[in-house]
Image (cartoon, helix red, strand yellow):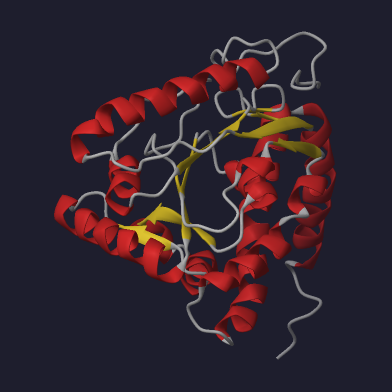
């Protein structure tokens, strides 16, 4: 049976040629198309890197030390997108004790800042849905990422109690996004208190980390994703020794206030981000 050439050969070749001509046109003339291309590659590249990491991490099995492998494989992504990550304050990390890191949460690009500053034996606490994200979910599981089901409060509390014990017995640090969800409005949402209850229960310090606004180079609402700069600031640790659950609301509010102050300070014009507003001539200005 002859499959090639056939009656559909010419139309298929013509369609392929049109696609090859269309993609560069969209790339240079349609900023929103460029945004979707970049985000698709970002997510696809992470899934591909996870496929490469899985057999290496599987040698140890589920182990927090595997996070070093993931970090090493992800560090280069910022160069692919022309994003310069500047880190300050790493001397504030306690040198030899467990602690809870809390950080603001803007988008999936937070991964770039996280990998730049991630301390040793530190794993994120993530929503359980990530576990089913294909190769990325398996790689995260092998790296010791802690998954919680936020819809089942009882299970989440149980997991956090286990994490408190793990912090103390296995010298592990955890990274939590206390806003609970991605925040694109250029400020910070109210903090959920789970991370602070965890720190108080384990009597370990809280280390706040602030990432500056991405609005100069990224805005989901405007479908804009260019090159730019991100600042990451590690703040002094906040002790929890002697605190009780009754102190958690004031503790969470105090940490949020200090983080929001720094966020506004390091986010370009000091206003905390606005709503992905573009500034004429800035790195984030879309060009067609």
At a point 33% along the width and 61% down the height, the residue shown is 163
Residue closest to the far bottom: 1
Q: Nearer the viewer, residue 134 or 104?
A: 104
Quarter of the figure with residue 230: top right
Residue 29 % position (x, y): 80, 27
* Residue 92 to residue 282: above or below: below
* Residue 143 to residue 286: above or below: below
Residue 166 % position (x, y): 36, 66
Quarter of the figure with residue 158: bottom left
Residue closest to the far left: 154
At a point 83% along the width and 32% down the height, the residue shown is 28
> Could you tell me if residue 187 is visible in this image?
no
* Residue 156 to residue 249: above or below: below
Residue 111 % position (x, y): 60, 48
Question: The N terminus appears in which quarter of the rendering?
Answer: bottom right
Question: The C terminus appears in which quarter of the rendering?
Answer: top right
Q: Nearer the viewer, residue 58 or 255?
A: 255
């Amino acid at each position: 049976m002859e499959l090639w050439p056939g009656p559909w050969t010419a139309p298929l070749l013509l369609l392929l040629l049109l696609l090859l001509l269309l993609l560069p046109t969209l790339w240079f003339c349609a900023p929103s198309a460029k945004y979707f291309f970049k985000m698709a590659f970002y997510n696809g590249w992470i899934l591909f890197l996870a496929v490469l990491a899985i057999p290496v991490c599987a040698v140890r099995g589920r182990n927090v030390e595997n996070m070093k492998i993931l970090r090493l494989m992800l560090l280069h992504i910022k160069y692919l997108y022309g994003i310069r990550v500047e880190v300050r304050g790493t001397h504030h990390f306690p040198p030899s004790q467990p602690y809870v890191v809390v950080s603001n949460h803007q988008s999936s690009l937070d991964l770039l800042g996280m990998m730049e500053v991630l301390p040793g034996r530190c794993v994120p606490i993530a929503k359980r849905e990530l576990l089913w994200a294909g190769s990325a979910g398996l790689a995260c599981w092998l790296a010791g990422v802690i998954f919680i089901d936020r819809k089942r409060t009882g299970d989440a509390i149980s997991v956090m109690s286990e994490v408190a014990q793990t912090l103390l017995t296995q010298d592990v640090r955890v990274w939590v996004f206390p806003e609970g969800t991605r925040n694109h409005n250029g400020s910070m949402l109210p903090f959920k208190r789970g991370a602070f209850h965890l720190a108080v229960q384990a009597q370990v310090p809280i280390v706040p980390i602030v990432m500056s606004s991405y609005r100069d180079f990224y805005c989901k609402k405007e479908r804009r994703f260019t090159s730019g700069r991100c600042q990451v600031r590690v703040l002094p640790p906040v002790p929890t020794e002697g605190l009780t659950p009754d102190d958690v609301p004031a503790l969470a509010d105090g940490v949020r206030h200090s983080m929001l102050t720094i966020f506004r300070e390091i986010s370009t014009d000091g206003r905390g981000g606005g709503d992905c507003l573009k500034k004429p001539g800035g790195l984030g200005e879309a060009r067609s």
